[in-house]
Image (cartoon, rainbow, N blue to C red):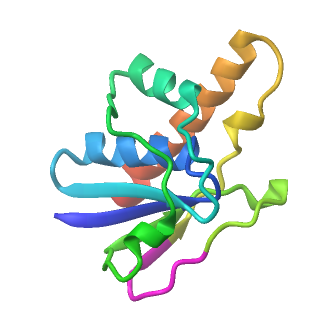
Amino acid sequence: MKSVLVLCTGNSCRSVMAEALVNHLGAGRFKAVSAGSKPAGFVHPKSLETLQRHGIALPEARSKSWDEFAGQPFDTVITVCDQAANETCPVFLGPCQKLHWSTPDPAKAEGSEHDINAAFDEAFQMLRERIEKELL
């Protein structure tokens, strides 16, 4: 089983959804965890709603620091911060495959409930497509 670490800054939206997607789509071939360089301390409720809407549960989801995984070997480390939005994405050092998937932060979406849900769905779909094309 290949191990995957998904990193972003807050570990409340994108990295949590990517973790769940890798574990769901990888069907036992991958074990993913996620973390942040500056964890928000909570998982955005819309992240969990989006996963549930797409039939994926992540009951143990929590925002955590990448310090929890220091010294652990990973086959792949994926960063999902959107550098175009001036976010600072964490760097993970070590011998592993490193991927960067620039994904807009849906937590920054504004507007109606429909608009916000659409932003989360868009991030979910972007991550799903990258996982299917580049990881699986």
Q: Main secondary structure of the magenta part?
A: loop
Image location (x, y in percent) of residue 127:
51, 44
- Observer able to see residue 136: no
At 47% from the left edge and 28% from the top edge, which residue is drawn? Answer: 48
Query: Image quarter for residue 96?
Result: bottom left
At 47% from the left edge and 71% from the top edge, which residue is drawn? Answer: 67
At 49% from the left edge and 64% from the top edge, which residue is drawn? Answer: 78
Q: Say above or below: 53 vs 120.
A: above
Image location (x, y in percent) of residue 23:
28, 46
Q: Say above or below: 115 vs 88.
A: above
48 displayed left or right of 101: left
21 displayed left or right of 87: left
Q: Nearer the viewer, residue 21 or 42?
A: 42
Magenta segment: does it hold 96?
yes
Q: Which residue lies furthest to the front in this view?
A: 41
9 displayed left or right of 49: right
Which range is magenta? Answer: 91-98
Query: Image quarter for residue 5?
Result: bottom left
Q: Nearer the viewer, residue 44 or 131?
A: 44
- Observer able to see residue 106: yes
111 displayed left or right of 9: right
Q: Say above or below: 67 vs 41.
A: below
Image location (x, y in percent) of residue 9:
64, 58
At 34% from the left edge and 34% from the top edge, which residue is drawn? Answer: 58
